Amino acid sequence: MAKTLTKKDIEKFKLQLETKRDSVYQNAKKTLTDNMVLDPNDLPDEMDLASSEALQSFEFRLRGREKAHLSKLNLALRKIDDGSFGTCVECDEPINKKRLEARPETQLCIRCKEDQERDEKVYS
């Protein structure tokens, strides 16, 4: 059985979540300023252009994944504000503190996450 989180624990997780969120925002800003413009005149041949386009596409896919991660971070921060942080959304049991330390944005306890992964493996 997971222990109830202390106010100090909650503050620590809130800081971690805000730091992660800020990092995602910084990466998004960097992508917009550094990687958005692809000038074909700067690239000497078609291979360089294709390589740059592939790299840009990869960057955008990463940013898409970060957008989903950002949603999870924001949800966890809202849960801190409403007092439901650290509770599994599947079984309503407290999420183990060690699990939250590893991934504070998690919404599932380890048992429910393992069940979810087992189901994904069966249906994929």
Image (tube, rainbow, N blue to C red):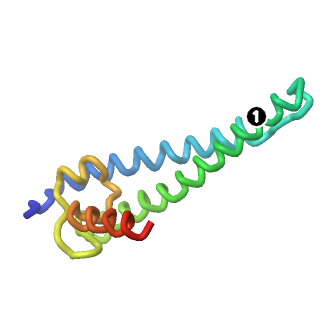
Q: Is residue 24 left or right of residue 98?
A: right
Residue at horizontal 82 percent and vertical 30 percent from the top: 47
Q: Is residue 120 left or right of residue 46?
A: left
Q: Which residue, as the protein is rendered here, is positioned at the far top?
A: 44
In this orientation, which residue lies closer to the viewer: 120 or 3? 120
In this orientation, which residue lies closer to the viewer: 64 or 76? 64
**Residue 71, x across and y down, in percent:** 48, 61
- Say above or below: 94 vs 11: below
Q: Which residue, as the protein is rendered here, is positioned at the far bottom?
A: 91
Residue at horizontal 9 percent and vertical 60 percent from the top: 3
Q: Amino acid at mark 1?
A: Ser
**Residue tagged by mark 1?**
52
In this orientation, which residue lies closer to the viewer: 82 or 55? 55
Q: Quadrant of the C terminus?
A: bottom left
**Residue 65, x across and y down, in percent:** 54, 53
Element under disc 1: helix
* Quadrant position of residue 96: bottom left
- Say above or below: 119 vs 66: below
* Quadrant position of residue 113: bottom left
